[in-house]
Amino acid sequence: MDTTVTVRLDVKLDRMLRKLCKQTGRSRSEIVRDALRRQMTIEFYEHLRSKVLPFAEAKGYLIDEDVFRDVS
């Protein structure tokens, strides 16, 4: 079942959204759903990262290269 969410956009953001719709041929809803999905994925990742980071640091994983070294 689909639900509806009402969002207020300032004039500049609305203008940008309309322009993007015209350029891509996608609907406003499609673009907003995609943007929301992407943002929620980022927020979820950052939340998980903040929970795991102390454990990783305790094991000596401070930078990406530390992980790559052990995974490769």
Image (cartoon, grey):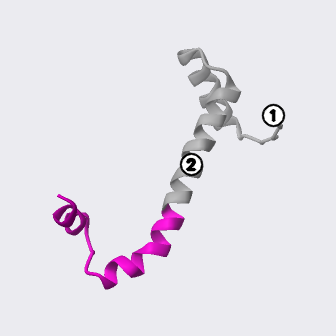
Instruction: Give coordinates of residue 48: x percent, y percent.
Output: 50, 66
- Tell me the kind of residue under disc 2: Gln
Residue 29 x %, y %:
70, 28
Specify the principal SS of the magenta part. helix
Which residue is tagged 2? 39
* Boundaries of the magenta span: 46-72
Does the magenta-highlighted stretch encompass residue 50? yes
Question: Would you name the residue on which mark 1 appears?
Answer: 2
Which label belongs to residue 13?
none
3D distance between C-alphas at marks 2 and 1: 20 Å
Q: Is 27 in front, or is 49?
A: 49
Q: Is residue 35 above or below residue 29?
A: below
Counting from the top left corner in percent of width and height, residue 33 is at 65, 35
Q: Residue at x 54, y 50 (%)?
A: 41
Q: Nearer the viewer, residue 6 or 3?
A: 3
At 27% across and 75% down in the image, what residue appears?
62
Identify which residue is drawn at 25% across, 69% down.
63
Q: Are marks 2 and 1 in contact (CB under 8 Å)?
A: no
Judge left or right: residue 55 versus residue 41.
Answer: left
* Amino acid on which disc 1 is placed: Asp
**What is the secondary structure assignment of the residue under circle 1?**
loop
Q: Is residue 51 magenta?
A: yes
